[in-house]
Image: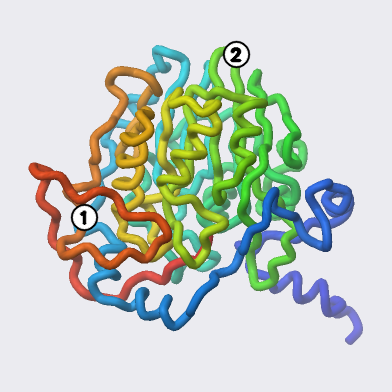
Amino acid sequence: MTGSLPLRPRLRALRPEAFGADPSGARLERILRSPNFADGVFQNPVGARTRPSGSMAEFAKIYFHKEQRARRNPGAPIPVHPTTLADLAKPPAGGLRLTWMGHSSVLAEIDGRRVLFDPVWGERCSPFPFAGPKRLHPVPVPLASLGDVDVVVISHDHYDHLDLPTIKALAGTDTVFAVPLGVGAHLERWGVSPHRLRELDWNEATEVAGLTLTATPARHFCGRGLRNQQFTLWASWVVTGEEHRIFHSGDTGYFPGFKEIGATHGPFDATMIQIGAYSEYWPDIHMTPEEGMRAHLDLQGGAPLGTMLPIHWGTFNLALHPWDEPGEGTVAAAGAAGAAVALPIPGQPFEPGAADAPAEAWWRPFVAAGPAPAAVAPAPAGPARPAGAPAAAPAPAAGREEPEAVGS
């Protein structure tokens, strides 16, 4: 038809905005030259199954079990820290402060600069506003009220780490975006200027506002939309300032590379480590709390140095384990290792190593009542609730559970 677009551009125009964009041109050429790209896809540092394994019938049986469905959600509204804005107005006394905003979103104030990791302010981690995992607590502070951010760091392009409405809001600021190779194509489609992008392959570094940001390996996968070409990289991140250094794991399975990252860039004042949304159905791409603690120790040269902040849990329902199990497992793993672990409620700023850093299991009063379900994850659940812990809140009323994202 005269004047009509060729088929491929027409289809591309119909692609939902949340799916982002495929790399092309010079970006695609750089991807094809990457030492981490082979056989048409980015490769993991060690082998990993990136799709659910095991019996889908057994998976469905667990998914629809009534008591287990209840335990995958909190039994009462989750609190958020009420004074975030006032707390953030005062610089950290020791030069380093972390504020966990929920899931993997962390504001790091380091040596006078502000770094925002994996910001997700959207209501759902999904390409659609009407379906997909819905947040279990409100965002602690409006994005527009957060203040200036020097650099936004993205670990990979899954919906619970790269959020369209959040990026579009940040696109109107002057912040720089540090992202893994290929992810810049999504951001450019959503309005981020190319000159504000720092797009890195593993072990490449960039300087932003006096900080050194290094993309380091992770064991995960990528993809948005119906076609997953594996043309965008995933990464963990090291941020080094004049006095402090921190590590953000993104999403990753455990692998020996943590020791190499620690030897090259560590030890760290604080690590932010993924400890939730694990399952025996995808054991290679997410860590259990025990594996997360092992990664923290590897990053610190084998010693229980610094402070570990557990991330990627509590905000979205993304796996089959009970909602509180990642927190309990982290407490148990930290106790066994003699390591310092911070346990803030969402939005609660803290300074790693400070005497008043949060260390209480804040989630216990919000656990749904009822017997603990049978184990459905490869690692044992956390310890039994100790005597004297706050009573569990009533289970939520029966109703439709939000769909879960598998292996996000």
Label 1 secondary element: loop
In the image shown, does 328 or 161 lie closer to the viewer? 328
Disc 1 residue crowd, few under 14, some 14–19, many 20+, Cα 10 Å: many
Q: In this picture, is 57 found above or below 281?
A: below
Q: Which amino acid type corresponds to the residue marked 1 in the rendered image? A: Val
| Residue wearing tag 1 | 367
- Residue drawn at the location 74% of the way across and 53% of the way down: 185
- Residue drawn at the location 41% of the way across and 17% of the way down: 92
Q: Determine the residue located farthest toward the bottom in the rendered image.
A: 1
Q: Locate residue 5 relative to residue 128 in the image: left or right.
A: right
The answer to whether residue 199 of the structure is visible from this angle is no
Q: Locate residue 238 relative to residue 320 in the image: left or right.
A: right
- Picture disc at residue 242: 2
The answer to whether residue 185 of the structure is visible from this angle is yes
For the image, the number of numbered tags is 2
Label 2 secondary element: loop
